[in-house]
Amino acid sequence: MTDLSDKSNNGSEPPTDSVENVIAEVAEMKGWMRDDQAVMLWGAASQVPPGGQIVEIGSYHGKSAIVLARGSEPSVRVVAIDPHAGNDRGPGEWEGLAEDGQADNDHFEANLVSAGVRSRVEHVREFSDDAHPHVTGPIDALYIDGAHGYAPAVSDISGWGKRVNPGGIMMIHDVYNSVFVSLAVIRLLYLSNEWTYLGHAQSMAQYQKSSTSRLSNLVRHLRDLPWFARNMTLKALRAVKLEKVGRLLGHEPGSGLY
């Protein structure tokens, strides 16, 4: 077993470890990934065959990229797409400063080195629509946590989703948190006959590219609508400064809805 405290490889060799170890390592890094979502990402990455490819859209400070890299075989290509432009950095933030984007990029780079995976992750510093030419070949696992507007979400799901291999996995963050992302998913995936809904880890939904009936896919989605309704209720309570009432729904104020 690799000693995780030994970072002398400067990112040249990924440590051999478990998802629990990685979760502990990235706990203090900024980001919105929950522990059960890290487990979902790790599971998808571990299924990618040697020589395969993982693509992440939206990396921020690198928490999820680290999980994907550490959870996959060394020969798997891991591509992180994020313009680090200073905009869309968090909930409700649509605009920002270039200085913030550069600071995010610096944290991203430092975190990858600290986790021992800098050589494993290729960073494409472009907006996702412009990144296609930089990513060659099909995708085995796709993780989307990009711009949360309706049009960008539709573009990411449809444009990058079509590049996923049959049997491959697509995961989408904030499906049950962002209204616009949710609307894009409802439009493109609720009645899809090529993407099978597998379930969710809080606001992260998981799909497999496989044939399915539209009706059965719709039923699987509808089973999780109560969770979606709960999240929307909590967001409304937060907006009117009544988040404490959310304790009645099992929510801890200030804990986030991701």
Image (spheres, rainbow, N blue to C red):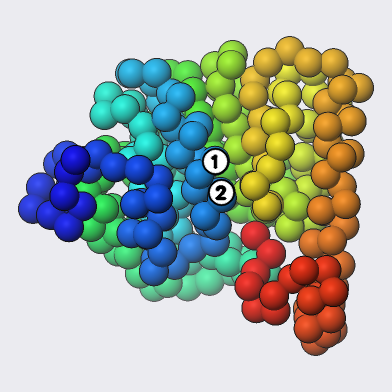
Measured as percent of width and height from the top left, residue 220 is found at 83, 32
Q: Residues within 10 Å of mark 2 (few under 14, many from 20)?
A: many
Residue 206 visible in the snapshot = yes
- Horizontally, residue 75 falls left or right of residue 39, namely left
174, above or below 198, in the image: below
**Measured Cα–Cα span from mark 2 to mark 1:** 5 Å
Circles 2, 1 touching at the beta carbon (< 8 Å): yes
- Horizontally, residue 34 falls left or right of residue 124, namely right
> In this figure, what is the number of numbered marks?
2
85, above or below 209, in the image: below
Residue 156 visible in the snapshot = no
Furthest toward the front, the residue is 1
Furthest toward the left, the residue is 8
* Residue type highlighted by circle 1: Met
Within the image, what quadrant is residue 110 found in? bottom left
Give the number of the disc on residue 40.
1
* Residue type highlighted by circle 2: Gln
128, above or below 49, in the image: below
Q: Residue at x 72, y 48 (%)?
A: 175
Measured as percent of width and height from the top left, residue 87 is found at 54, 64
Nearest the viewer among 222 and 52 is 222
Measured as percent of width and height from the top left, residue 67 is found at 40, 45
Q: Secondary structure at mark 2?
A: helix
Q: Secondary structure at mark 1?
A: helix
Nearest the viewer among 252 and 218 is 252
Measured as percent of width and height from the top left, residue 20 is found at 40, 50
Q: Which residue is mark 2?
A: 37
Q: Residue at x 78, y 48 (%)?
A: 182
Q: Residues within 10 Å of mark 1 (few under 14, many from 20)?
A: many
Furthest toward the bottom, the residue is 241
- Horizontally, residue 63 falls left or right of residue 211, namely left
